[in-house]
Image (cartoon, rainbow, N blue to C red):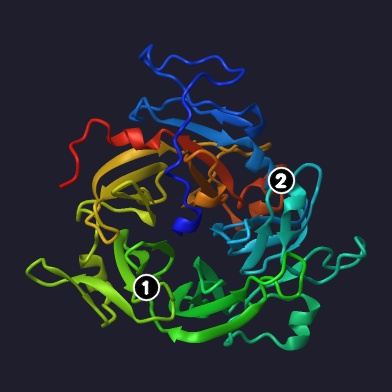
Amino acid sequence: MKPIHLILSVALFVGACSGQQEPYYGNSDVKMPQIDSEWNLELMPNRAGQYWKVFVYKDLKYNALFTRSLGWNGGDGVFTTGLPDGNIFWSFNDSFYGVVNENRTRGNSSFPRNSIMVQTPGEKDENLVWLADYVQTSDPNADRYYQVRTHIRHPKATLSAEKIQAGEIDQDYLYWAGDATIYNNQMQMLWGAVDNTDPNNLMRRFGTCLATYSLEGKPGDATYMKLISRNDDFNDHSLGYGDTMWEDEDGHTYLYTTSNYKVAVARTATHDLGSQWEYYVVDPQGNFSWTTQYPSTQDAEYSTIIPLESGCSMPWVFKKGDTYYMIGQSIWFGRDVLMFRSKHPYGPFVDQKTLFTLPEFLDKIGEQRYQHVYMVNIHPALSRTGELVFSTNTDCASFWDNFNTPGSADFYRPYFYRVFNWESLYDNDAPLD
């Protein structure tokens, strides 16, 4: 999350929806946001408990853009970072690459554990430049057509170079994406190291890699998004500080994570992610302070910056005016998207409210009920008029259901939402002290 691409301060346009009849919201004075028909947004019903001034839309344009049939056709993670040249960097964790059939079943697909893409200005398929190492793209009848290799491998991964060249994917040690930021005209990104070798403790986080990418040239150039350096031993944290970030005007970059749905925060000494990290922890008397000593998991949970009785996952922080806001998904894969507010990027974040509730079903053929919704991420670089842009990930009952039945290729891929007039959620609340 970076101020360079945060456009939340842009005023919302209020008026009648173009070409749409205004629904009744219980107040005849309520006006809907002015929506350009080319955005292809679909208004969601105002659900019970949703504040009547907040308007939530399904983003049918981006949903269609990520309904793909060749190459990347699914993935979770889904982070974006606005770049100085106007492009948008995307990263994904576990992804499907290959071919999707007409009935939206996946054919042969590989499963790289991370992947990257750059979106050039525009919202068409040609604007998505997949920076993938394809096994082969010339013969649709040969093996591994439009399958790819994992973007960044962990050094402890054990597959041989010959197997990697053939298109096999590491499953023992891997990297999953954290957030990214721009520093010194380069992109710095945190990759979380994951150990998948212990059947009693699968997907164990055991460290962080700091990777630096070049922004020279343009998509397609050998220099653009080239991995300049990587520090695989950057830290050995089991907590994912930097899962999400906020680059503040106070000179620090704030690094957020959760453990047991409690939100912990660290910060960098400067906007360089390689500078000294400090951790915000509370002592037994309830006093918070910054320390360079990495906290235990228990200490980090006790040092939560949201109310002790609250919990969320994927905490995203941004600022509008003098107020910092935090977005998070409700616990246990909940469908409620929560909002908090604070006077500081390190909290305390208070005044929890439900911003909106995600649909129970997906707009797809075949089975529409998903098993879990997770990784509810926000994308400031995709915002047009100051609205909040969300993506979600969903899975199906069984991993193999991603392949077998019509519509199965539309699990395990992002769906997008836009929320207008979100600031009104606190219209009736007293100002923060």
The residue indicated by pointer 2 is: 405
Q: Horizontal placement of 167 versus 212: left or right? A: right
Q: Nearer the viewer, mark 2 or mark 1?
A: 1
The residue indicated by pointer 1 is: 239
Q: Residues within 10 Å of mark 2 (few under 14, many from 20)?
A: some
Q: In which quadrant is the N terminus drawn?
A: bottom left
Q: Position of residue 15 (x, y in %)?
A: 49, 21
- Which residue is at a point 36% across and 62% down the rendered structure image? 248
Q: Horizontal placement of 189 versus 104: left or right? A: left
What amino acid type should be assigned to the residue bearing mark 1? Leu
Out of 352 and 107, give the one closest to the viewer. Answer: 352
What amino acid type should be assigned to the residue bearing mark 2? Thr
Q: Position of residue 271 (x, y in %)?
A: 41, 72
Whole-number angstrom distance, CA of label 2 to CA of label 1:
37 Å
Q: Position of residue 294 (x, y in %)?
A: 29, 80
> On the image, which quarter does residue 115 sit in?
bottom right
Work out whether residue 379 can be spotted. no
Label 2, secondary structure: give it: loop
The residue positioned farthest toward the top in the image shown: 28
- Position of 192 relative to 425 (above/below): below
**Looking at the image, is mark 2 or mark 1 earlier in the sequence?**
1
- Which residue is at a point 57% across and 87% down the rendered structure image? 156
